Amino acid sequence: MGELDVITSQEGTAVRVLARGELDLATADRLERAIADAERRAGGGSLVLDYSGLDFMDSTGLQVLLDADVRAERDGRPLVVVAGDGEARRVLELADALARLTVAEVH
Amino acid sequence: MHAIVADADEGRRAALRAELERHGHQVLVAADVETVLQEGRRNQPLVVLGAEVEDGDGVALCRDLTMVPGGDGPVVVLVGYPGDVDVDAALSAGAADVWVLDVGGETISAVEVRVALARYYARLQAENLRVGGEFALMRQALDLSGTGFVLTDPRLEDNPIVYANRSFLEMTGYPEAEVIGRNCRFLQGESTDRDQVARIAAAIREGRPASVEFVNHRKDGTPFFNELHIAPIRDERGEVIRHVGVQLDVTAYRVRDQLFALEQRARQAAEAAERRSSFLAAASPALDARLDLRSTLESLARLSVPHLGDVCLVETVRSGEAHRVALSAVDDALERKLLALPSTSPLTPDAETALARVLRQGRAEVVDGRGGPVVGDAVDETLREHDGRSGRRWMLVPLRARGRSIGVLALASLAEDRRYGIDELALAQDLAGRAALALDNARLYEQQVEVARVLQASFLPDRLPEVEGLELVTRYRPADAAIDIGGDFYDVLALDSGKTALAVGDVAGKGAPAAALTGLCRHTLRTAWTYEQEPAKVLEVLNRMLLSERRDRGRYATVVLATFAPGPDGIETEVVCAGHPAPRVLRASGEVDVLGERGTILGWRDDIELRPVDGVLRSGDTLVTFTDGVSAGDEGGPLSEEALHRELERCAGRDVDEIAARLQAAAVRAQVGRPSDDVVIVAARAV
C-alpha cells in the first residue's frame, strides 16, 4: 500500500489541495477529508485539486475528484484540476472527464 | 541538659553517673520510681533506666514516662548488659534507645555519642507522633480506599520507608518487616521506566512534589502500573523531614485503556473499510478486518499475561470445534510449544473439559486443574510438562455475544501461586466482553461476505445464449477476498431485433453495497434493451438510474456495450464506450485494432457524450472486451490498455479460448504487488 502526501495551501482566494504519491482505496479517505476542509475554507473561492504528483491512481481517486466536481457545481464553486501528464491524466482521459473539467497545466 | 539515672545495678549506676558528669551533665540519681516520674516530667531530661530500677521495672517506668501528651517528654534510654533488656519492648514502650554495655566495664564508652543519638531518636519519635497525628485521618481514609501510603525519612541513610499502610503492603505483597527501613526502589524492575525514576529522584533531591506512573513489581514479581504521587513534609524550620508517597495500582485501568484503544482502532478501521466500500479499490477490507480481529485478540492475550495469567488462550467455538485464535505465554519456549499444538479440536456438547462446561453454562469459573481436564489433553499436558505440576489455577471466562457463548478466555497460572479473586475475575470478564465483541463483528462481516456471494451470482448470466456466427468465451476471475466482490459484470442478451447485445461493465465500489448496485445495473440494461434500440440510448438510461441513486457520494460505472448482427461481410458490430476502455479486435491477419471511442463515465453528469462506432468482424477476427485498465502502474496494478494490446498481438493464430486465457493470466500477473481485483475478459470471434 502506497503513501500519499496531502498538502493544502491558500493561494490568493483559491485553496489548493496537492495530492502526491499513491491515491487508492487505502489513502483516498485522507484526501477526501482534506478536500472537505478545503471546500469549507474556500467558501465561494475556487478549489484547485492538484493530481499532477500522483504516481498511482485508481478509480477511488477518480471518484473523489468527480464527487468534488459535483459539489462544486452544486455550490457554484470553481474547481480547477491539475492533471499533470502522468497517471491522473490517463485515468481522467479514460473517463472522458478531462475535456469536461477545468484543467490547468502543471501548477 | 540534666540527666536522671535510675538503675538497680549499683556498679552500672555509678559508672553512668561518672561518665555523664564527666561530659558536663547534671546527674540526679533517683532511688525510686516516684522520683523518676516527678523529675522526668520537668525540663525534658535525659532519663537513663536500668532494666530493673530499685523499686520497679525499667520498661514499665519508661512507658509511664513517655505517655506524657504533647511529645515534649524526657529522652528515655534503657541500659543493661546483653540479655538484660528486651529491646523491642523498650522501643515500643517509647524508649529512644537501648544502651547495651560490655559486662564488667568500669566506664561507659562513648556516652556522649550515645546521648546525642538518643536525643536525635527521641526527636524522630516525637515527629513520628506529630506527623502520624496529622496523617492519622488521611491514613484511615487511604486504608479504606485501597491506596498505598508510605512515609520515608530523608534524613536517614538512603531515605528509607518509616511507615507503610496496609494497602501498600497488600498492593506490593511484602510484609511490613520487609518494607520498613528500605528505600522504595526495591519495587522497581527491568520494565520500570528509568526516566520516571529519575524524575522522582530529582523531586526528592529538590524537595518538591511529583507524580509519575511506572511499572513496579510485587514481591512475587508480578508487574503493576503504579501511579505514584510524592510530596515533602517540612518541619517548622523548613527542613524536609518526611516524604509522603501515595500509590495507586492503576494496572486495571491501563490494561483497559490499551484494549479500549485497540478496540477503537479496530472499529475505526472497520468503519473506514465500510465507508470505502463505495469504490473500486486496491485494498482488501476483508483482510483488514481479519487482521484487526486477529491483532485485537492477540493483543488481548498479550495484555493478559502476566497480569491475569502466565498463559492466556482465546478459544472460539464453531460447528462443533474449538479454535484457538490467540495465545500468549510468559515463557517464549512454552508459547512456541503451545503454538505448535493443533489449533482446532473437536468439541462435543457433552465434552468433560472445564472449557466445555464454561461454554455450556456461560458462567466464568476458577478451577484448580485437579478436578479433570481443563482445556484439553494437548494443552493440559504441555503445561504439565512445562512446570511439572499436575494442578494449576485456571480462570475460564466465557466469550458471550447475543446471549450465546461463542468462546472462552482461558487464563492459567504456572508454578507460582496466583490468586484469582473478584478483581481478577472482573477484569477478565471485561476483556472477554471485548474479545466477544470483536469476534461477533468479524462473524457479521463474514455473513456480509455470504450476502455478497449470493449477489455476485446475479452479475453473471447462467449461460450464454447461442449466437449464430459468433464464438463467445468469457473469463471471470473474482478478487481473492470474497468481501472484495467487485462491481465487474458482463451479460450477453439476444435482442428482439435479432441482434445480440454484449455488456461488460465495472461499477465503482466493493462489497455487498457495490454488488447490489451491480445487479441493479445489469437489470437496468436488460430492461432498457426492451424499449431502446440504440446502445447509446440504453447507456443513457443507465446513466439516469445511477444519477438517481447518487447519495453523499456518486454511483459511478463504466460500461462498454456492443451489438452483433450477421451481415453480408461478416458480423456487423456497433460499440459504445462510457468511461470504459475500448474493445480491441485481433484480426485474422494478426493485427490489433481499437474498436470504439471514448465516452463519458456514467453517474457523473446528465449530459454524457457517447460516440458509437461501427465495425465488421470478418471470419477469424476476435473482438475482446475487458474490465479494468483504469490505471496503468508499470509495477503492478491493473493491466493497462497498452499492455493488453501488446499481449493480444502475441495471441495471433490462437483459438478464442486460448486468447481469453492468456489475457486473463496477463491481467492477473499485472496485479501482483497489489490487492487483487476482479478480472473479466469476454472474447467474441466471428466463425
Image: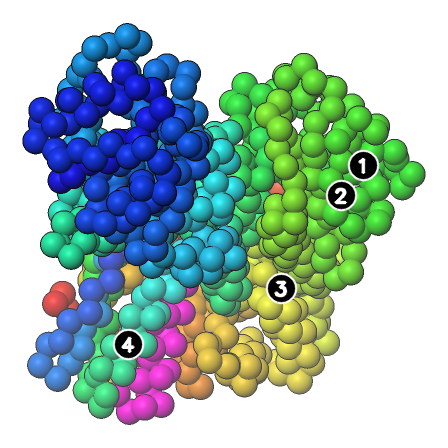
**Identity, as a three-letter code, of the amino acid under mark 4:** Asp
Residue drawn 13% across the image and 54% down it: B238
**Identity, as a three-letter code, of the amino acid under mark 3:** Ala
Left or right, B457 with reference to B215: right
**Identity, as a three-letter code, of the amino acid under mark 2:** Glu
* Disc on res. B385: none
Q: Secondary structure at mark 3?
A: helix
Report which residue position mark 4 lands on. Answer: A37
Question: Magenta stretch: dominant SS?
Answer: helix
Q: Are marks 3 and 1 on the same chain?
A: yes
- Disc 4/disc 2 C-alpha distance (Å): 52 Å
Report which residue position mark 1 lands on. Answer: B354
Chain assignment, label 4: A
Q: Are the residues flagged by discs 3 and 4 in contact, CB closer than 8 Å?
A: no
Magenta segment range? A57-77
Residue B102 location in percent, x, y?
Answer: 28, 11
Report which residue position mark 2 lands on. Answer: B365
For the N terminus of chain B, the quadrant is top left
Front: mark 4 or 2: 2
